[in-house]
Amino acid sequence: MSGQSEEDLAAAWGAALDEEGGDQHTPDAARVLNQAEIDSLLGFDSKGGEAGEESGIQRIISSGLVSYERLPMLEIVFDRMVRLMSTTLRNFTSDNVEVSIDGIVSLRFADYLNSIPLPAMLGVTRAEQWDNYGLVVVDSALIYSVVDVLLGGRRGTAAMRIEGRPYTTIERTLVERLIGVVLEDLTAAFEPLCPVVFGFDRLEVNPRFAAISRPSNACVLVRLRVDMEDRGGKLELLLPYATLEPVRELLLQQFMGEKFGRDSIWETHLAEELRSTEVTLDVVLDEQIVPLSSVVGLKVGDRIALGVAPGAPVRLRCGEVALFEAELGRQEQRLAVRISRELERARGAVGAGA
């Protein structure tokens, strides 16, 4: 009886909705979307292609991604770091090691912490001169590979992994040594740009204890791939933008020139042009302060008496700046001056004007 009443009630509700909607509702309005239509709405390609354009909710999600200015010099620093690491890790492990960059991206700090694949070890580093912090994250595969290599594991055999257990003291010590080697290479990579020392602060296995920045702060993430023949793993380096702020102007440079931005060719050209520049010098015989009425009353033929004795030194000026003291004379049919000394006070005036 109850089942019959529920069916009648549902039929009554359906009829009421049809009457209220009238012609505005179509039979398709109550149709359930299939999987292909749901994927199209969310922007996923059911064929698995990567060339499809983003659409739907995926565009909304992508609009919230971090987009910050590009730092060209930082990419050069990381390239230099990779070359250094390839050599130092070969000496560290006594094995054939290849290091490559998987990508350099910008993202928010909270998003990165939530994306760290566990288990992993997080090394907190401190940039001494910049007074800020960074992260070096070593994934599980690289941890077991390094431990296996350093403890004499045979080549051609995969590293033994026992998931779900805490890392031992030996494993933490060996990974700490690995992070110390990476930080030394990072310090050496920044050395041509600016003096900075990346020191090891502590080692964590829980991302919550490695919070070195606010969750919404932007960071630069460098993903590195370390291959040791049939073993290896991933190593990630995270530097917040706040850490890089003291050297932001240097990182914005397009190329690593002489003294980072100094163009010697332009300096030489500018010096040559300055030497060939024409400068007008005025010979000042005397300066007097006279009333305006006397100046207005001057007529052709009037004489102005100079308060300078014959043979007294005169001054050479460029604009309002007095440069030299000279003697007035005559050469053939022209008046001439001979510079006797440079005025010391003129140097300070020129330097202040510059």
Image (tube, rainbow, N blue to C red):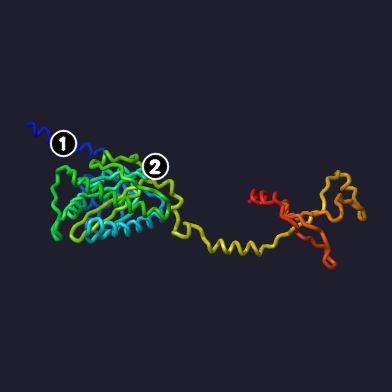
Front residue of 242/77: it is 77
Q: Earlier in the sequence, mark 2 or mark 1?
A: 1
Mark 2 vs mark 1, foreground winner is 2
The mark found on residue 131 in the picture is 2
Q: Is residue 162 left or right of residue 17?
A: left
Image quarter in which the N terminus is found: top left
Residue denoted by label 1? 10
Residue 147 is left or right of residue 182, and the answer is left
Residue 205 position in % (x across, y down): 23, 42
Give the residue at x 23% y 45%.
Answer: 121
Question: Which amino acid, by three-letter code, is at mark 2?
Answer: Asp
* The one of 240 and 231 positioned closer to us in this rendering: 231
**Which type of secondary structure does the marked residue at label 1 adopt?**
helix
Q: Residue furthest top?
A: 2
Q: Residue at x 42, y 54 (%)?
A: 193
Give the quarter of the image for residue 30: top left
Looking at the image, is 296 positioned above or below residue 52? above
Q: Is residue 46 left or right of residue 341?
A: left
Figure check: 291 above or below 259 = above
Q: Which mark is residue 104?
A: none
Q: How many marks?
A: 2
Which amino acid, by three-letter code, is at mark 1? Answer: Ala
Please provide percent x and percent y for residue 150.
Answer: 19, 53
Secondary element at tag 2 = loop
Which of these two is toward me, 321 or 65?
Answer: 321
Q: Is any part of residue 63 visible from this angle?
A: no
Q: Residues within 10 Å of mark 1 (few under 14, many from 20)?
A: few
Q: Residue furthest bottom?
A: 332
Q: Position of residue 232 (x, y in %)?
A: 21, 56
Q: Give percent across and percent down for residue 336.
A: 80, 62
Name above or below for residue 238 compared with residue 267: above
